[in-house]
Image (spheres, rainbow, N blue to C red):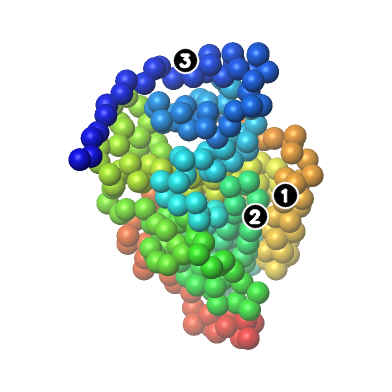
Amino acid sequence: MLKVFSISLPPRETFGDFFFLLRRLSLIAQISLALFFSLWVVCAPPSFASTLPRVSIAASLLHRCLASSSFASTLSEDCIGAIDGTHIPAMIVGNDSSNYRNRHGFTSQNVLTACNFDLEFIYVLSGWEGSAHDSRILTDALSRRNGLKLPQGKYFLVDCGFSNRRQFLAPFRGVRYHLSDFTGQGRHPENANELFNLRHASLRNVVERLFGIFKSRFTIFKTTPPFPFKIQAKLVLACAGLHNYLRKECRSDEFPIELDTEDALSSYSEEDDDFEILSETQEQQRENANQ
């Protein structure tokens, strides 16, 4: 017979005091940080912003601990990162400007990104019109000769803007999902689907954090770059490579946690599935370029 035990966890502050005690006794190196943060999160799901000031560690280290701990295993240890699109302001000359105008009302290129839990780019596809839907760009990325590669048995986390299919895990639709939906007293998950969505959002949040760091590091992407569009698209790729280099070689170069507010606060509607207005001419040009 399966027995379910109910335990009363101590206040979250107790774990913080415990952490400082271990560090003062030089014992922190002998325990698993992942285990410690798993206990911290189980006590009550805090935000990263509220956790970091208490334990005084790098944001990237906390995210790696959570991603590699039992906190992430509720989804699967085979998750290798997250995928999402972000809008970067674009200067468009000519009659094509309407196709580059996104649902937020400004002209942009929609950049598809796959990242790992170390806040590094795995794959970047730039140059798509701002009106293009994320799922359509993903299809293009998968069809390219040198496109996005999917390791056997691994998968990415995606939001509801993408289809839930093999190697792409989306959250439950019609259920609370964004981290802000669970913030505040009495707003904890009420059922299994909401709990899954909370865990999913907590991990997929890494791609939104990456967008925020990327745009803070390369501030040119917060405004319209004064270059021809082909140069604008290539500039994204060049800076993504530079970002990865800095992540590997300058780990002390930590940025404050800053979500990409344009993406994090925008709500997805299932009606967006039909928000694809590329002209046939542009589509044919893209297909010819990929051959």
Dot 2 corresponds to which residue?
Answer: 121
Percent position (x, y) of residue 193? 29, 47
Specify few, some or many for label 1: CA neighbours under 10 Å numbering under 14, 14-19, or 20 or more. many
Q: Residue at x 48, y 33 (%)?
A: 38
- Three-letter code, disc 1: His
The span from disc 3 to disc 1 (Cα, nearest Å) is 37 Å
Specify few, some or many for label 3: CA neighbours under 10 Å numbering under 14, 14-19, or 20 or more. few
Mark positioned earlier in the residue sequence (1 or 2)? 2
Specify few, some or many for label 2: CA neighbours under 10 Å numbering under 14, 14-19, or 20 or more. many
Dot 1 corresponds to which residue?
Answer: 243
- Three-letter code, disc 2: Phe
Left/right placement of residue 108 relative to residue 187 reads: right
Could you tell me if the residues under marks 1 and 2 are in contact, i.e. CB atoms within 8 Å? yes
Identify the secondary structure beneath mark 1: helix
Could you tell me if the residues under marks 2 and 3 are in contact, i.e. CB atoms within 8 Å? no
Left/right placement of residue 203 relative to residue 182 reads: right
Q: Residue at x 46, y 64 (%)?
A: 167
Dot 3 corresponds to which residue?
Answer: 14
The span from disc 1 to disc 2 (Cα, nearest Å) is 8 Å
Determine the image quadrant of residue 269.
bottom left
Percent position (x, y) of residue 49? 53, 29
Q: Residue at x 42, y 62 (%)?
A: 162
Q: Is residue 227 above or below residue 28?
A: below
Q: Quick one: 254 or 223, which is closer to the camera?
A: 254
Q: Residue at x 32, y 60 (%)?
A: 270
Determine the image quadrant of residue 163.
bottom left
Identify the secondary structure beneath mark 3: helix
Q: Look at the image and tell me in which quarter the C terminus lies.
A: bottom right
The span from disc 2 to disc 3 (Cα, nearest Å) is 36 Å
Q: Is residue 45 above or below residue 78?
A: above
Circle 3 or circle 1, nearest the eye? 3
- Three-letter code, disc 3: Thr
